[in-house]
Amino acid sequence: MEYTISKINKIGVKIKDSTTLNSDEQEVFNYFRQIHELIFEEFYKKIKLPDKYIVVTRLKRMESIIDKLRRPNSSKLSRIDDIAGIRIIVNNINEIYKVSKLLDDLLIDDNFQLKYDKDYVELPKKDGYRSLHKIFTFNYENKSLNFEIQIRTRLQHLWSTTVEIYDLIEYKNLKSGSFNKLKTWEGLFFKRCSKTVENFEKENFTTSKKIVNKIFTFKKYIKIFERLKTTKSIKNINLLKDYKDGDSLLLIIDIEKGNINFLDGEVENLVTYYNILEQEVEKNIKLLLLTIKNIKKLRSAYSNYFLDDDEFIKLLETIYSCQEEKWKKF
């Protein structure tokens, strides 16, 4: 299917304004998003990372696209960096930069170009978000498709997914909202948690302990923490019997009922079904189309969709109780 950048951007304006797309526009949008799947195929051909890392790819959900288009100073649809997203979860900060260099060495060629890096590890966002973002372009049929690779540590990932869990259970928008999060108790709470994790990773344990002590001596923060503790992770998970690592996978998550269903199959069929479901499902249903190299690591990669914040809770409690002998497990 042929499309023009101008047409894609006009469709983006309609999506931003909640204007219903006609059938032709919907078809063009679906195709535009679907061809980003080609990036993942080429990425996996070129990049082989050790099994100790979690590598997962996903197409951006419609609600996330809408949110991004509505942000202040937002990009046009054709310029959104992360329609295709690749996440790599490593064990420590040093490994972030080792993997980043490896990607530069092995990925960049005539089809892949690095646009820029955003280092939110050295310079975290004001709300506490930490990760290294690498923005690439992939050349396809004389068009450039943008995509983003996020590289973060396991503890940085724990923090980020816990923020998303809080958003899901409290119907907040801390992850992607354009408001000043640091004017809310929740925003300040997670900012302090981020500083706790940052110092813990840098082995500044005394500083990490002091920050946690402040969290657990303030009633507003304790209330937020207790709310996270009462979150019940999703247990009713209908796993696939014949799934092979590296196959495409569609997750259908019912937050209210606590169910997760998995569908697998040819990627083209899954994308088609994904596009149809997106227009029909209710707000409490979350859809995620992804590929993961190790299905056993799916829960770790997307603990937010399993409402699983247990490990984050244990980390804060361990630091607070000063059980230094247990710190090594983190």
Image (tube, grey):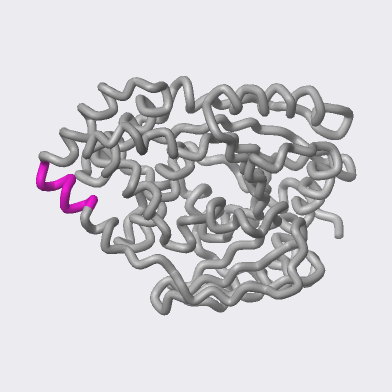
Judging depth in this view, the residue of 74 and 172 nearest the camera is 172
Query: Where is 64 relative to 127, above or below?
Result: below
Judging depth in this view, the residue of 317 and 108 nearest the camera is 317
Find residue 198 and report its horizontal and vertical position in percent. Answer: 38, 28
Drawn side of residue 73 relative to residue 80, left or right: left
Q: Is residue 289 visible?
A: yes
> What quarter of the picture does the C terminus occupy?
top left
Q: Which image quadrant for residue 319?
A: top left
Query: Where is 109 relative to 301, above or below?
Result: above
Residue depicted at x 75% and y 35%: 137
Find residue 292 and report its horizontal and vertical position in percent. Answer: 69, 54
Q: Which image quadrant for residue 326?
A: top left
Residue depicted at x 41% and y 47%: 175
Query: Where is 124 relative to 14, above or below?
Result: above
Drawn side of residue 235 relative to residue 277, left or right: left
Q: Is residue 80 visible?
A: no
> What quarter of the picture does the N terminus occupy?
bottom right
Judging depth in this view, the residue of 85 and 106 nearest the camera is 106
Drawn side of residue 86 relative to residue 201, left or right: right
Q: Which residues are magenta?
A: 218-225
Find residue 108 and report its horizontal and vertical position in percent. Answer: 81, 27
Find residue 83 and report its horizontal and vertical position in percent. Answer: 65, 49
